[in-house]
């Protein structure tokens, strides 16, 4: 077979020689036995290597040769039907051999492809099994009724099953481990498979709860519907986020209360000054009950304003500014894109480490971007440009926009100054947060627009 496929010219020559030999033999035999059926052998050889039109030409040549070499007398009435039958027989034999061999070749290629696919599937399954088994994520699969059919080592550890209980999770209802996942339909729709994630409560041994994030998807197999689920324990992350949010809220509240008490002290000082002036200009008024009551109220206000409310104290640490700016880029792109604001990012890739508090610094950055977003609300083709420059001791981050700018920059960082559209209390808090770790927030006038500069101290080794 390989010889025939690789050498069609040689096979055709051999077939031609066989046709010639059969013709000579047919003419020289003394008895009148026709040998036309022998031409099927060279036709089969041609059919194994030649295309269809070559086979038809060979059938015509064999028909002519057979008619010439046999002992039958040719006439119109007998010769034409005999030649037609011979041609059909030769052509059908050659075409049949050709299609049969093509079918065999196709099946061989198909078998080879299946073997390669099965080998690749076995290798992928081995790699996947190794990956799942060594993964730190708890991974298990469920059947259509929500019962566990496979679980890795991390899943047994998460739900507190020891290695000796390797099969303890198999066949267990997932609702006893993650009740919310047990309420999900595990009957997969082939056209709309379910792929999503959720936060839910998980239950360890003795029903000890923990917070879990679950990524799961449904799919169909030959053994029925399946659900693949990956579970992580985020209890510690959740607690840390809540503690950080609470600390940030308390710090901001302390700063706000500090601003209020500062304004109260200013008002109390002004009232005391007016009282002293009245005592000088109208001495008789100072002995009246109303004036005495006013002095007592002023003293009370002064005591309230001097209650020791410490400002937020943040512990500055050595912060990789590059990582912080990458997080800011992700957040700012999504934040500004929602309001059709173009972000121009001009930040080098080799930023140094600085002294800062990560949560406080990110809060300041986002507050500046929110102010820019508000200022650009009615600006055509709004843009925000974030640029970082550094020297040996400081890193300057500039936030500039092409909005209407600031009409009263001298009042910008006062605690309760406000315009009809925006209030500067957020900027007052932002400056206080930066000052708590020796950073600075300043304003630079632009025409058009505005520019706020955050100056951070470089952390030296």
Image: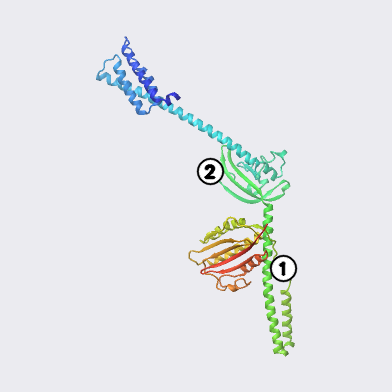
Q: Is residue 40 left or right of residue 426?
A: left
Which residue was labeled with disc 2? 190
- Foreground residue among 309 and 81: 309
Is residue 51 depicted above or below 296 in this figure?
above
Q: Closer to the camera: disc 1 or disc 2?
A: 1
Q: Number of numbered discs present?
A: 2
Provide residue 446's location: percent of width, then percent of height. 53, 69
- For residue 207, side relative to residue 78 (left or right): right
Residue ID at (37%, 21%): 13
Badge 1, how many Cα within 10 Å: few under 14, some, many 20+? few
**Quarter assignment of residue 134:** top right
C-alpha distance separating marks 1 and 2: 61 Å
The answer to whether residue 156 is left or right of residue 8 is right
- Mark 1 / mark 2, whichever is N-terminal: 2
Local SS, label 1: loop
Position of the C terminus, as image quadrant, is: bottom right
x and y, in percent, of residue 383 in the image:
51, 63
Check disc 1 and report the residue beneath it: 310
């Amino acid at each position: 077979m390989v010889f025939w496929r690789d050498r069609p010219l040689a096979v055709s020559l051999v077939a031609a020689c066989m046709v010639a030999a059969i013709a000579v033999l047919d003419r020289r035999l003394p008895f009148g036995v026709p040998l036309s059926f022998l031409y099927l052998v060279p036709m089969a050889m041609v059919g194994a290597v030649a295309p269809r039109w070559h086979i038809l030409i060979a059938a015509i040549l064999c028909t002519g040769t057979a008619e010439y070499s046999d002992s039958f007398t040719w006439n119109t009435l007998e010769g034409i039907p005999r030649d037609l039958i011979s041609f059909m027989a030769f052509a059908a034999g050659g075409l049949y051999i050709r299609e049969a061999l093509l079918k065999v070749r196709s099946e061989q290629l198909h078998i080879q492809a299946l073997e390669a696919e099965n080998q690749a599937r076995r290798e992928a399954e081995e790699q996947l099994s190794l990956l799942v088994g060594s993964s730190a994520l708890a991974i298990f699969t469920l059947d259509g009724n929500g019962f566990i059919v496979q679980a890795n080592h991390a899943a047994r550890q998460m739900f507190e099953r020891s290695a000796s209980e390797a099969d303890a999770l198999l066949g267990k209802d997932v609702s006893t481990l993650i009740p919310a996942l047990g309420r999900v339909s595990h009957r997969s729709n082939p056209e709309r498979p379910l792929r999503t994630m959720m936060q839910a409560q998980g239950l360890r041994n003795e029903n000890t709860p923990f917070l879990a994030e679950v990524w799961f998807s449904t799919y169909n197999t030959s053994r029925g519907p399946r659900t693949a689920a990956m579970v992580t324990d985020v209890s510690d992350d959740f607690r840390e986020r809540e503690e950080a949010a609470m600390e940030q809220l308390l710090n901001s509240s302390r700063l706000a209360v500090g601003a209020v008490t500062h304004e109260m002290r200013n008002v109390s000082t002004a009232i005391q000054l007016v009282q002293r002036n009245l005592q000088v200009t109208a001495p008789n008024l100072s002995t009246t009950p109303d004036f005495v009551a006013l002095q007592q109220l002023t003293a009370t206000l002064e005591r309230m304003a001097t209650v020791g409310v410490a400002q937020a104290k943040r512990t500055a640490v050595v912060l990789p500014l590059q990582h912080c700016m990458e997080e800011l880029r992700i957040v700012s792109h999504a934040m500004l894109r929602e309001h059709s604001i173009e972000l121009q990012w001009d930040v080098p890739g080799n930023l140094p480490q600085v002294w800062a508090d990560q949560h406080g610094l990110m809060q300041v950055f986002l507050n500046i971007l929110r102010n820019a977003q508000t200022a650009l609300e009615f600006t055509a083709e709004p843009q925000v440009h974030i640029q970082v420059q550094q020297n040996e001791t400081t890193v300057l981050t500039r936030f500039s926009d092409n909005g209407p700018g600031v009409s009263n920059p001298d009042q910008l960082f006062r605690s309760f100054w406000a315009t009809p559209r925006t209030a500067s209390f957020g900027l007052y808090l932002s400056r206080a947060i930066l000052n708590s770790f020796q950073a600075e927030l300043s304003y630079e006038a632009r025409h058009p627009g505005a520019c706020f500069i955050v100056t951070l101290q470089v952390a030296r080794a």
